[in-house]
Image (spheres, grey):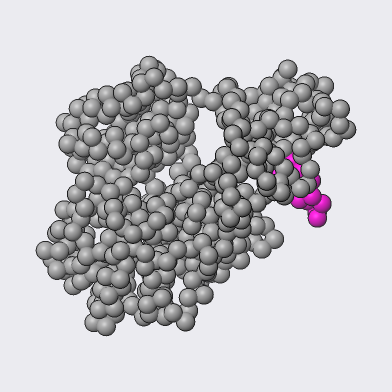
Amino acid sequence: MSQWKIKEKAATADQMDFPYHPIIVNLLLQRALNTKEKIESFFSPEYDRDLLDPFLFADMPKAMERIRQAKEKKEAIVIYGDYDADGVTSSAILQEAFDEIGIKSSVYIPDKKTEGYGINANSIENFAKQKVSLIVTVDCGISNKSEVELANRKNIDVIILDHHHIPAKVPPALAIINPNLKNSGYPFDQLAGVGVAFKFVQALYATFIPEKMEQLKWMLDLVAIGTIADCMDLLGENRAIVRYGLVVLSKTKRVGLKEMFAVGRISIDENNFPDARKVAFQIAPRINAAGRMNHANTAFNLLREKKQDLARGLALELEKNNQDRQKETAQITGEVKILAKNMFKDKKFIFAVGEHFPIGIVGLVAGKISDEFNKPTAILQKGDKISKGSMRSIPQVNIIEAIEKCSKFLLKFGGHSQAAGISVANENLEKFYEALSKIIEKELEEKDLSLALEIDAEITSKDIDNQFVNDLKKFEPFGEGNAEPIFLMKNLEVSELKIVGNGSKHLKLFLRAGDGTPKIFEAIGFGLVEKFPEIKKGDKIDAVFNLSEDEWNGNKKIQMNLIGLKII
């Protein structure tokens, strides 16, 4: 069980004159929301106010001029995407926009198993034969210097729309729209690939069909999905994108999404409003499953399909892919756990290579292992001559910067501070591992890596009322960079206990406050039966939980969503 650690109270919490409960004020200050203007913007994101001008990107005018030429000359344009949810949603909205402004385009998404991430030379050669004269990349391209050089030699211009780490040598593209690029001109660097694609789409509409700008809001369902799926901070511009995107998702016009919801039994409609968690755990994995298990075109086609019968077939295929993905991930994760507990017990970096590791799920496995053992983790599929795979990190290590320091051993790499993809020749595997291991060991020297559950505040039953919960709801959408607040309440008595759910895995408790008030709280603990088999009626406990409002048949009640508990 992880330790419980209560965050320090913000130094100025007692001096701030905000019309909220002191604990709400402290939560705001923890997020650096220390003025009435910042709080208003955070609590009430606005589409028109908070979405920035796409022409702040220095290369955007140049890119629009090139699109204008392509439109006038009826050139062949390829949208070059990526196989994850961010790349698939990016490709879908960009082709939708090109259709709307009267530009014919085709979408090319590489096969994860045979081509890997980013642009590859073979596809450039094929595009040249097809007389393609312009490629627009989405969610990739920034680490493809040699491939862009090849495209230029073939008289193909490249516009890069990406958000990944900027390498030492930038590709010689006609235009680069990436908020992480030095001198990009754009003040917000947390856009997902689909966020960058949406800025490009905004510029397209402003340039070619300004009278239809309002229609852009209907694309926000996909922009929200890609942003949440890629774990971008849900702050600033992303907050407005996701807040409005979830509204659009609840009333989406996309036949494919509706069929996905029906087949996957995902309750999303105007009466069942989605949150970021539902997108992250139910929608994004299904879109990702296509590229992991087969080909991402299945997911892309589903998002673009307008006929219900065809959409149903694609949704069923995705559902099967997702079920297969879950089984494979569980099996390989189990194998790597054994390695992590034995070979890497005393190491600060977990590195597993296997010929039978499916390339489609190595990133998922790396993420699960990194989360469980709190160590940077690399999982690679070993081929005949080359090994390819994914890395996931912990907050204390910027993995892409660490990789860059030993990139001489790699054939290809790219990614973010917390996730990256690599290709390495088998003869360099050991050298790469040793070099990266040394860097990680040094970075983590004297750093506390013990797993601790960070609690935002200790509260009493007197703090909890409908107003408090309503104010908490204003912090939504929760996600990366804006975690759902975690509370601790001590000395609660279990007045009633039930075991619920399929497989009898979940605890339902009724908890009586121990501070003299007559309040009894309903609490649900998903998956906690196995962890606390000895708990019984009459026990006194300390509980750690999120707070939410549960609605059933029109009746609202406050519910504790248990994260952990201690029997005292």
Q: Is residue 560 above or below residue 268?
A: above
Q: In which image quadrant can residue 128 be found?
A: bottom left
Q: Is residue 161 visible?
A: no
Residue at 59 percent across and 25 percent down: it is 5
Task: Give percent across and percent down for residue 24.
Answer: 67, 42
Q: Which residues are magenta?
A: 548-559
Towards the viewer: 75 or 343: 75
Q: Residue furthest front?
A: 15
Taking the magenta stretch, the answer to whether it contains residue 419 is: no
Towards the viewer: 454 or 328: 454
Q: Which SS does the magenta portion mostly show?
A: strand
Task: Give percent across and percent down for residue 175.
Answer: 25, 64
Q: In which image quadrant can residue 404 be found?
A: top left
Residue at 22 percent across and 65 percent down: it is 174
Q: Residue furthest right?
A: 518
Left or right: where 37 falls relative to 511: left
Task: Give percent across and percent down for residue 363.
Answer: 38, 40
Q: Quadrant of the C terminus?
A: top right
Task: Give percent across and percent down for residue 565.
Answer: 68, 26
Taking the magenta stretch, the answer to whether it contains residue 549 is: yes
Residue at 29 percent across and 65 percent down: it is 59
Left or right: where 276 falls relative to 179: right
Left or right: where 44 falls relative to 367: right
